[in-house]
Image (cartoon, grey):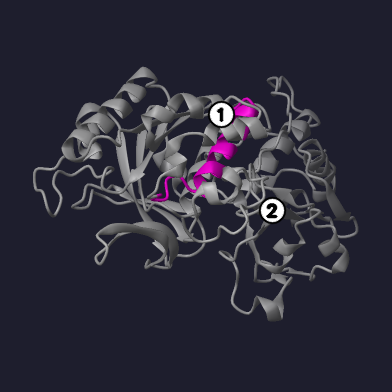
Amino acid sequence: MRSTLNVAWLALLLAVGCAGRQELETPDYEAIYDVPLEEMWPSVREYFTDANLPYREDRGSLVLETEWKQEFGGSKIAGYWHRYMVIGKRETPTKSKLWITRITKSVNKTLSQPGKELDWGVFRGPGGNDGVALSPEDDAARLAFPVGENAFYMESGQGTRDLTMEWRVFRGVMPKLAKKQPVSAQPQVAKAAATFTECGQSILGLKKQAKAGGVMLLGELHGTREVPRFIAQTVCQLVTSGMPVTVGLELPVENEERITAFLQSQGGEVDWLKLMEAPFWRSPYPDGRGSEAVANMLEQLRQLRAQGLDVAVFVYDHPKLSGQKREDALTQTVQAQVKAKPERFHLVVSGNIHSRTAKGLPWDAQYMPMGYLLKDQLDDVTSLDMAYDSGTAWICAANKQSNKLDCGVKETKGKDNGDRFFVHAWSSPNPEGYHGVFYVGHVTASEPAILKGLGNPDAAPVSGSTSGL
């Protein structure tokens, strides 16, 4: 070997531990391997093999491409699939690095690019002198797509450089390379064991706001596909980094035992039927909290638990109450959960009135939302309002003619801030008491789970039910 590891490298390696653990803190600079490219590349191949990410390789140019991998718990209706293009590059004759591009496809059109019908399959890599133009996917690649899912090929596709994955591979590869370095009196390096959970593209800004013992309130617009996915993706990225997470859902407290039993189950047909027996899923006015996306999110959390990851869920709504009495009851239930497990990170999701930390509403200056009450009772509460691009949502709104709630797919107006999920905190709370926003991109309506095969991602949709009750 032409180089040795210094103390800083050893400290990093000892901090990494198991290579399969997804570190939440990702540097904003490239990972540089202190070895020549040809000496580093065999360990890269080994990482992807151990991580159960099959690939094909162009050995002449040190480029490999993984097969499609489904995001954890994806469904045939709202599923996401990912593959990685890995390019080895020489930094200097004795140093090297990787460029890793994550290519994402979805069954829905959320990520679709204008003009894709004219330019489908062509990905343009990073520009500049090092720019790489990746060849179009040919028929063989299309036919290698997961069986029965070729329709995905005709919808969304995006490629972005994935710095998080680059560091993840680096942390998996360097312990093995370190053992080959002639370093005297070297401390023992933790054994690498590459295990891999696909958590989707890392959520920008999340690592700055999520910490053990903290409470994050998410004020959402019910009835979208994207918010439940944001929740599941957040949980996945946190628990794979070693942080225990408890999710609080604004569902009736009567469902607590049923949901807990489902999360501890094998997720079979009988388990789904028991989950869906609750009257909540069959409400005559389904407001989006009982959507297919919420059911699929519960399946995603169940799968994470099945892998031995530390995920818990509780429900806290008291639908028989209203007004301030309901806010007080919500607060008491959430507060009891947080104080019982203060070492965990609590992610509490609700409609965006409950999550405000400021007193008063336009129609009631004395109104005290759940967020306002929790802020005074707990040490670390962050409240984020939902930000999104325009689209659709399943919404229940008052019908002035019938004086009843009208539930269905409705247009929503938002602001386009790109396709990437992110969390952004302001320097001070806004008048509603929000400390920042969580952004979910273009929103798409999610219909009630009862219309979609009882919510089971593997079940066929109920025939004849497409748009309403």
**Residue drawn at the location 68% of the way across and 32% of the way down:** 19
Tag nearer the camera, 1 or 2: 1
Taken as a whole, is the magenta stretch helix, strand or loop? Answer: helix
Q: Is residue 302 magenta?
A: yes
Residue 379 coordinates in the image, percent (x, y): 27, 28
Q: Secondary structure at mark 1?
A: helix
Disc 1 packing (10 Å; few <14; some 14–19; many ≥20)? many
Residue 413 coordinates in the image, percent (x, y): 37, 68
Identify whether 413 is placed above or below 404.
below
Q: CA distance from mark 1 to mark 2?
A: 25 Å
Amino acid carrying label 1: it is Leu
**Residue drawn at the location 69% of the way across and 37% of the way down:** 196
Residue 397 coordinates in the image, percent (x, y): 31, 59
Name the residue beneath numbered marker 2: 82
Residue 141 coordinates in the image, percent (x, y): 84, 62
Q: Secondary structure at mark 2?
A: strand
Identify whether 325 is placed above or below 105.
above
Magenta stretch, residue numbers: 286-309
Name the residue beneath numbered marker 1: 263
Residue 218, quarter of picture: top left
Asked if residue 205 shows in the view, the reply is: yes
